[in-house]
Each structure stands twice: as C-alpha cells, then as structure tokens.
Amino acid sequence: MAPSSKLAAAAGALPTDRSESVFTDYKPAFTPHQATVEAFRCLYCSDAPCMNACPTHIDVAQFIRKIATGNLHGSARTIFDANILGTSCARVCPVETLCAGACVYNQLGHPAIQIGRLQRYATDWALESGEQFFQAGASTGKRVALIGAGPASLACAHELRRLGHSPTIFEKRKELGGLNTFGVAPHKMKADVSLQEVDWILGIGGIEVRTGVEIGRDVTLEQLEHDFDAVFLGMGLGPDTPMPVPGQDLPGVVGAVAWIEAIKLKKLDLSGVRSVLVIGGGNTALDCVREALTLGIKDVRMVYRGTAAGMPGYQHEWKAAVLAGARAEWQAVPVAFEGQGRVQKAVCAKLDGNKQPTGEKVTLDADLVLLAIGQSKLGAMVAGLAGIAVDKGVVQAGADGATGRKGWFAGGDCKNGGKEVVNAAAEGKAAARGIDQYFRSK
Amino acid sequence: MPSLWTNCAGIQSPNPFWLASAPPANSGAQVQRAFDAGWGGAVWKTLGQPIQNVSSRFAGHTIGGVRGAGFNNIELITDRPLEVNFREIYETKLKYPKHAVIVSLMVETEEEWKDIIKRSIDAGADGLELNFGCPHGMCERGMGSAVGQEPKVNERITSWVKHYSTVPVLVKLTPNVGDINPHGLAANRGGADGVSLINTIKSIIGLDIDRMVIEPRVGNQSTNGGYCGAAVKPIALHMVAQLAQNPNFGLPISGIGGVTNWRDAVEFILLGSSSVQVCTEVMLKGYRIVEDMIEGLEGYMKTHGFETIDQMVGKAIPNYTHWGDLDLNYETVAKINANTCIGCQACLVACMDGAHQCIHPQAGTRVPRVDESECVGCNLCKIVCPVPDCITMAQVDNGFAPASWNEFLYQGKAIRPKKGVHQ
Ligand SMILES: Cc1cc2nc3c(=O)[nH]c(=O)nc-3n(C[C@H](O)[C@H](O)[C@H](O)COP(=O)(O)OP(=O)(O)OC[C@H]3O[C@@H](n4cnc5c(N)ncnc54)[C@H](O)[C@@H]3O)c2cc1C
Ligand SMILES: Cc1cc2nc3c(=O)[nH]c(=O)nc-3n(C[C@H](O)[C@H](O)[C@H](O)COP(=O)(O)O)c2cc1C
Ligand code: SF4
C-alpha cells in the first residue's frame, strides 16, 4: 500500500518522545502460537452472543475459526467487512462488557475468549500486509461532506466509497482519527497506531480529506449544503465541562480530555507534580487515574460524588486502576481549589447517599486537578438549521442516521451523546447506508 | 484470482468442496442451505430401500478434552421414502443448476440398480456414487462394504451401473481392506469414471465401562460402527495417495475422511483428489465452515501460483516414494533453542524413554542438551515440545553422497555409520 503522502506526513509529524511513549500495552499482542491456542478454544457458537453483543455485529466465531486454520486474510476480511475500524476497536473496545462479556464460557466459569486480542492479531496482520480488502463502488458522482475525522466519519466515508459515492472529510485539527488519536488511553492504543489505521482506511482511495478546516468558522453550514449532495455530522463532543467553583482558573486545574490530548501528542513536563486529583467517576476519569500513575505520579486519587459501586466508569477499569495504585475519595465533590500561584489543595464537601452535602469537608493535596466531569455537546452548531432537532446538545437522528432535515445525517458521539468507538463505527456505517438510500429515493 | 472451478470425473462444481453422503446431505432443504453457504456440491445421503435406524447412533471420541476428535456412527442409509428424495433432488437441481448433486446409491439386484439409476438421472443427478463402503448393517445384508471388499462383485456391479447410467459414476470405496489397490482397480475395470474414498472405518469407539457396553449404546447393547472425523485423515490420505500413485489406476479421485478445514483439503488435493468431501466436521460445526475452506484454498493457490485446481491435483505424488528409495545418508539432529526453551523437559523424558537416550540434563539450567553424536534425528523431541520452533531439526553435512537402501543393496553405494545404537 502506498501511504497517502499527507497521512504519512501526519504520522511522521508526531514527536517520538511523547509522554504516552512510556506506556506498554495493557493487552499485548498475541504470538502466533498464543493466538492459535486461544482460537481453538472458541466454541464457534451459532448465532453467537458475542456477535450480537458487538454494535457492528462482527461475525466473531467465523473470524476466530479463520485464525485457527491460519486463514488470516479471511479472518481480517470478516472483521473489516462488518467494521472498518476493527483495528482500533480490537484495542479500545470494552470487550469485558461487549463481546467477551457475552461469551458463553462465562456461564461455564471458564475465562471468556480473548476476542479483542484475537481481533488485534488478525487486524495487525492486515495492516502490516497493507492488503486492501474492499474496492470503491462504481462512481455515482454524489458528493458527501463529513464534519470531523473521528471514527464515525471514517466509518461513514469508507462505506460511502464502497457504495460509489465521493466523500470529503473536514477536520478542524491537524491530526485525523478523532478521539482514537488524541483521547484513547495509551495503554490501549497510542496515537501513531490510530494514524496508521486512518491511513489504511483511506487506502480505499477517493476519500478527500481537508484538515485545519473548522465547519461553522472556516466554512459555513449553508456553504456545505450548497456544495454537497448530503452532509454527515460526525463532530463528536466538545471541550471538557468546567467546574464553576472558586479557584477554577488556577494553573494546574485542567480539563481531562485536554490533558490526555497533551500526553498523547506532546511531551508534558510533570516534574513538579506529586499529587493528582481526578474529579469524576466515569471512564475518562478512570483513564486519567491510570495515565497519571503510569507517568510516575504516586499519589493519584479519584474524587467522585457517589460510591464505587455507583460510578458510571467500568468496574473492570477501576479494579485495574486499584491494582496500579489508585485511591479514591468517594462521596465527595470539590467546592474550592486553593493555592499560591497554582493549585495546591482541593476543598471537598462530603456527600450522602443521595449526593447531598453532609456538612463535613475534607481538604486534599493536589498539584494537578483533572476535571473529568463530562464534555460539552456540540449540537448547538446545527440547531439553527430548520428541521434538525437538538436535545441538550445531542443531535437527534434515526437508526439510519437521518436527521429531520433532508440530506443531513449524523452519527457517533454527537448523536448518541458519547458512547464508544465501536458505536461511532456502527452509526457511521449505518448513516452511509442511510445516505445511499436517500440518494436512491431522490 | 485463482479459479476453484472443479471437474471431478466429469462432474462439475463451482468449487471442490462437496458434502459427503451422510446426514448433512439428507434432504433438499439441507443441501440447498449448504449451497447457499458456499458448498460446491453434495453427495445425497445414500438411497436404497429405506431402512429403520436405531437410537442412539453416534458416539464422539474425546481426546485430551477435544470433543469429536474422532466420530463413530451406526446409522444406515436413507430412512426417507425414495419419491420424497427424488422430488427434493429435482427441486434442488432446478434451483442450483451450477452446483453438483451426486446421488449415492445402494441396492441389491441388477433390476433394482437399473430402476434407481433411471430415477436418479430423471431427477437431475449430475453423477452417481455407489456406496460400496458402509461397514455396518448394510454389509450384513450383502451390500455396502460387503461389495467393496470383494473386487469381483465391485467390478460386476460397477459395470451394471455403467451400462445403465448416462452420467458419471463414482465408486465409493471402503477402507476396511488390507490394500486399497485391488479395489480401485476393480472399479476401474468395471468402467467407473472415478472413485471416492474413504467411507468409515470399522470401529469400536469406546465403552461405557460401568455398564460394560460399547458406545453408542442401544439400550444395553451395541455394535461396531464406522469411524470418521479428524482422526481418520491419515488413513484416508494414505489410501488416496496409494491409488493416485498407482500407474494402472489413473481415475479421478474424490477425497474423503477427516477433512475439517482448508489445509486438510489442500492435502487431499495435493495427493491426487480433484474434489473433497466432508461429513463429520459439518455435523459438528455446520455448513458455515466452507467459507473459510474456500478463502483458505484460494489463499494457498495464490501463494503457490496455482490458477486452477487441476494444476494442484497430485502435486505431492512425485515426492511420495517407497522406503527403500529414501536417502539413508540424509541426516538431521535436534537443536534446542535455549532462548525459547521453557524447561519442561518433555523432550528429555521422551528421548530417554521413547527414543535413543541422547537428550541430557545440564547442571545449573533446566534447558537440556542434545548429544548430537547420538541423536538419530527421529523428531520425537520436536513433536512433544510445547514451544513452537524451539526444537528444530538441522540437517548435518556428513560428507556422504545420497544413497538409498536399494542403492546400497544393488549398487553398493556407501551408507553412513548408524547412530544411537548404544552397543
Ligand atoms: C478520554 C476518552 C477516552 C476514551 N476511551 C475510549 C475507549 O477506551 N474505548 C472506546 O471505545 N471509546 C473510548 N472513548 C470514546 C470514543 O473515543 C468516542 O466514542 C469516539 O471517538 C466517538 O467518535 P466520533 O467520530 O463520534 O467523535 P470524535 O472521535 O470526537 O471525532 C470528532 C472529530 O470531529 C472534529 N470536529 C469537531 N468539530 C468540528 C468542526 N466544527 N469542524 C471540523 N471538525 C470538527 C474533532 O476535531 C474530532 O477530530 C473515549 C473518549 C474519551 C473522551
Ligand atoms: C452419521 C453418518 C452417516 C453416514 N452415512 C453414509 C451414507 O449413507 N452413505 C455413505 O456413502 N457414507 C456415509 N457416511 C460416511 C461419510 O460419507 C464419509 O465417507 C465418512 O464419514 C468420512 O468422512 P468424514 O471424516 O468427513 O466424516 C456416513 C457417515 C456418518 C458419520
Ligand atoms: S441432535 Fe437433534 S436429533 Fe439428535 S438427539 Fe439432539 S435433538 Fe435429537
């Protein structure tokens, strides 16, 4: 495969001494022998629960059998045919709650099949071989604009190409891949792997990419509607939600996603940091906790309003964080950040079972506070377009991605309010089919 | 892209993968589902005078926790009325004109053969397969392997069938014979267009040792059955290769026995099969296994530069020779990679107790040492080693020119001194 020059440049533009470079894979690559042994363990279930648990419905049993027989080409094809982001999904999917969580071995008390690692084995092979599995369909001449170059738009654009349409992706950043590149925890996947995957996806040819173009600022929505036959909204979520308490502007109080982006794309100087507080109890908070620990900070504490059992983050992730040395302040919320010139302490109010203040306060040391209490929603951007409904910042669209405005489709975090990469991949692909249907019915 | 188009004894199909005559090819609905899944052909479950089957019928051979490593059955031929079978064959051929439907037959008298052949061909059969192989039940009625074990009877019935048939005829051979050659040659003399082999191997798969009854059990009794599935592949490959290398044989072969995936199929083809039939693995895993078989075969053909199946058929036969022609001076010794060795010493005990006592412990490490001056190059250590490529067999340059036993005996060529004799 000849890498598209722009992308090779993009991957090459990443500094090699990024903070994330010190991370090792939490779920490392299988050796051929390990993969074969694990693949032979698969029961090859019929109408397999793992397949049904996957939002993109990868035929898991079939791709695993193909690994067992040594048909890696066929295995990768089975994966990519369902999910062109199979490479990143293999690494970043919460398989414990998706496919592997549904594995029937769980009912036998045996370890579930390590589906993510097997998927990685087959997709790594494919990326290394450079093989392209799919060809662009016969050209229809229809042009589609896609906002954002995250998983949703990439899945949509690739499927549009298979159907013969001509997609153009607009991305406001320099890097492609969305949160796969600048958000996912480096112990799952590093930025360069995401960029390689993007490069490989674009290898189908005919997907135009325009980076450094922010829709709504550099190009208006009206202009898009005028220039293209359909538009796909795949802009994901917005910046970290701030915490409006005294001291919120002190240096050292930063948004979690912004901080993660910095460790993934740059080298951060953490020399003065001894204590980190991560505010929130979701998966972004859990990622921050593990990332800070891996970067060598010993005192890392999560501050969450509820209890361990009630946090929205995955329990398996929290268990792993505890093993890595994480602590938590349960049932607490910061009411003020304090410090001379930069943050040094967080004053927290303790909460009861209904998340109401008990009156008790605790003060915690903190050289760095990471706010992981959510990301803003970007729906407002399109709320002005007649026909597009936006509810609390989330774009409203059907299973085929169609919004209430003709020719406007949506998928991924901006439509589902913030889920996983695999949901974005599924919704992007479904929207491509929806767009195709729309063109046919016009 | 290589072509999988198959012509086996004049029977054509989109790929070489056929369902063997057995439960997966029992009815029209099944065969049609199989074709939808990608199977290129199907040999219909043997037709004859419908029988009554027993329950239970199958037993699986579990080896080391692997269920169905071998499989055994005491089922007979079709138990469905002939007219129903013929109607479904007709419907199937109508819907799938490009796929091969071969009708397997087993009857007694010439009149019966004449009648059932006509009805099969009228229903649209692309070919006939004569079941001279079933090792239980039917042979006691003078059919099945009772025919396949008697070259004269085989030849006579084959010639009847050829006389009445307008479509290609395959004779399905039983492996329950000492030497397959006379039976293949009998089919040839009878005029068969090709042979299929193997049918199942007479077997007792195991016992319920508390009840003291053979499995599968029918009440408190049982009988011997037919062994098949992954475990029988080595026997099947040998019989296929025996016929493929026999210069007097020369007929196309449809290979059967223990095929579970594309690699097995490649082996059968390289040893002379121009189509490959599968029963047990389909029974265990379903028609969907064919997707991988097709992709895997295509991938293999691409890697090795084959454009058609024909180019592959029998490619390994020239390398299949007699023991007496093997090079006695070809010498290998085992090498243990100390970097990947995990120290289980499975090789050591195997060589000590089961081979030539040339793997020894070493002080200060669990990595054993091979005494290469005694190693006979038997492969046992490599076979038991759990680490892939940890033990490799390295060729030794011993200075001796190649010499076989026959060349030693008849031409006086020099052979190297023996190793591992411990006199
Ligand atoms: C910290 C963090 C960790 C995560 N970890 C995981 C994980 O381990 N596993 C998992 O499955 N999911 C994870 N997720 C969720 C996952 O990353 C998202 O669900 C997924 O990336 C959503 O894809 P998307 O294409 O909808 O949006 P995004 O990936 O957010 O991509 C949107 C793109 O649009 C661009 N954009 C936005 N506005 C504009 C505009 N106006 N003009 C042009 N471009 C624009 C953005 O720059 C961005 O590149 C994580 C999320 C976060 C925040
Ligand atoms: C349950 C069962 C029923 C079978 N019935 C027939 C039959 O009716 N006619 C026949 O020619 N072979 C029959 N066979 C033999 C198979 O067609 C095949 O030759 C044999 O099983 C070896 O192939 P395998 O290892 O793929 O199963 C039967 C096998 C099994 C397991
Ligand atoms: S496999 Fe089907 S027919 Fe056989 S015993 Fe089970 S349920 Fe009955």
Image: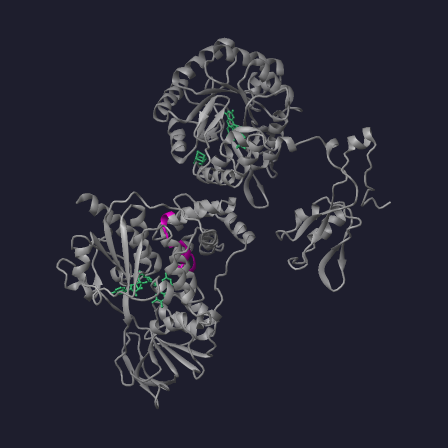
A417 or A97: nearer the eye? A417
Q: Which residue is outermost to the bottom?
A: A340
Q: Quadrant of ligand 3?
A: top left
Q: Is residue A79 visible?
A: yes
Residue B179 coordinates in the image, percent (x, y): 66, 24
Colour mode of the rendering = one colour
Residue A369 coordinates in the image, percent (x, y): 36, 80
Q: Is residue B60 left or right of residue B327?
A: left
Tell whether position A82 is magenta: yes
Q: In percent of the image, x 52 and y 45: which residue is there? A: A70
Q: Is residue A387 above or below residue B225?
A: below
Q: In percent of the image, x 44 and y 68: which residue is there? A: A319
Dominant SS type (magenta) = helix
Residue B354 coordinates in the image, percent (x, y): 74, 45
Which quadrant: the C terminus of chain B?
A: top right
Residue A215 coordinates in the image, percent (x, y): 23, 64
B272 or B341: nearer the eye? B272
Q: Which residue is outermost to the top?
A: B111
Q: Is residue B219 visible?
A: no
Q: Which quarter of the figure has residue A393?
A: bottom left
Magenta stretch in the rendered image: A81-94
Tell whether position B316 is magenta: no
Q: Is residue A301 left or right of residue A378?
A: right
